[in-house]
Amino acid sequence: MGTRTRLSRRQFLRSAAVGGAALASGILAACGSSPTAPTTGNPTAAAPTQVSSEPTKIRALMWSNGPVIDENFRVRAQMFNEAFKGQYDLDLQLLPYDQYWPRIDLAYGSKNPYDLYFFDVQAYGHYRAGLLANIQPYVDLAPELMNAEEYPVALYDAWRFDGSNLYGLPENIQVLALYYNRDLFDAEGLAYPDETWTWDDVINAATKLTKRSGDETTQWGMDVGVMDIWWGAQTLAWAMGGGFFDKIVEPTKFQVSDPVNVQALTFLRDLIFEYKVAPTKTQRSATAQDIGIFQTGKVAMFFDGSWAISGFQDVPFKWDMAPLPMWKDKRVSAYWLGGQVIPKDSKVIDAAFAFSRWSATTYQKTMASNHDWIPIARSARESEEMYVGQPAGLRKVLGTIEGARLGDFYSRNNQQIFGEVLLPTFDQLFLGNLTPEEAAKKIDEEANALLAKG
């Protein structure tokens, strides 16, 4: 498998934080919509009457993920058009992520929305503005999509924004993992991480794998990776019995100051400043250069999402992955759904949903063999094609989907909370400029103030 360039979830959210609040407020103002839930419609009511033999054109938009994955998306569009030749004609456009949401908002503002686009947290603001189609009536007419033996339908509840109806159709899923350098473990004669490991095992191994020459650390036992982002850190808080806010959809309260949550932040920060088995942010940047710290071969363990697999394909050492470690006897991973949403003012909702349905069913086997996304369908996710050329630990990692919790929260101003509160405060915490107690208090005060504004 060749090298693939992918925007990581970290890059998604860091990019989205810049100007996210302005975009959200701008689209609400431009469309003049009140933040109420869209009404339920008949599944065929929005579809135009076909008066010609020309195929129905579908305008779709996705963000760019690098040359290989982008080509896979172009091929996917061709496959769909071939499968529905004469019926549908999908025009799938790809844009850099920093141009993606502004383009969508401009289309809404000009009353000419795309017929379909791929979901990220910003789309929740479009739901609040009354811009998204309720696709539940369409899903009800496609019962295979709700087959619990094939799809993790319980996880779909996060996209039932009004509590009952789906406003997007998932097609892929991602989870967090512990990556490790097998060569470094072999050199030390240590057993590899696996699904039985606890955080105590991680610290014990990281201590043995950290090498120093005088005052200089030449090899790190681990790097906290995405655990220094709120959604990574929260997985440890979950395992300890805590959680940073009261609910995923429209949280009413941030509660990071809860002692359990502070304990989680303290533990992760101590890996850097007390145990000294992980680099500081400054040391990470100096070591990583332009290739990423795990890719340098100077870090034995690294936390990231399943989306990072393709970026490690050509590293000059043997590596593998394992599920997140347990806190005592409990593990809770984070998951993210990928899929499409459909504007309620699209004139071809039936056709747009046909693409979403095809992507979540027929296309799943191809998605598995392409190795760019993790298929939502169990049969594809557990197929042999899925694991050809993939790390041996991937099966165990994907097994943590059951019991995982969504690594997002949905509120009208979630991007403002992330960009103005969570991101800078977590940066200061892991730079050592704030204590866990100070960071937790700051987050609660500032995030709750923004929640109160609505």
Image: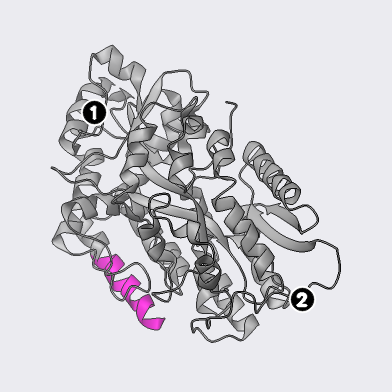
The residue singled out by tag 2 in the image is: 49
- Location of residue 48 in the rendering, given as x and y in whole percent from the top left corner: 74, 75
What residue type is disc 1 on? Answer: Ala
If you read the primary sequence from the N terminus, does the residue marked by circle 2 or circle 1 appear first? Answer: 2
Q: Which marked residue is nearer to the observer: mark 2 or mark 1?
A: 2
* Mark 1, residue position: 206
Gap in Å between the C-alphas at discs 2 and 1? 64 Å
Q: Residue at x 47, y 38 (%)?
A: 308
Residue shown at the point (59%, 58%) measured from the top left: 356
Relative vertical location of residue 125 with respect to residue 189 in this rendering, above or below: below
* Residues in magenta, as a range: 441-454
Residue 41, how many percent across, how many down? 57, 80
Circle 1: is it few (<14), some (14-19), or many (20+) Cα within 10 Å?
A: many
Badge 2 crowding class, 10 Å Cα cut-off, few under 14, some 14 to 19, many 20 or more, is few
The answer to if 157 sits in the magenta stretch is no
Q: Which mark is residue 327?
A: none
> Does residue 198 appear left or right of residue 218 in this picture?
left
Q: Please name whichever residue, 311 or 116, is drawn nearer the observer in this view of the structure.
A: 116
Q: Nearer the viewer, residue 278 or 258?
A: 258
Secondary structure type for disc 2: loop
| Amino acid type, label 2 | Thr
Comparing 257 with 198, the one in front is 198
Return the x and y of residue 386 as percentages of the image width and height: 49, 33
Image position of 355 (left or right of 150): right
Element marked by disc 1: helix
User: Residue 128's spot in the image, x, y percent?
Assistant: 50, 78
Q: Is residue 269 above or below residue 216?
A: below
The C terminus: image quadrant: bottom left
- Main secondary structure of the magenta stretch: helix
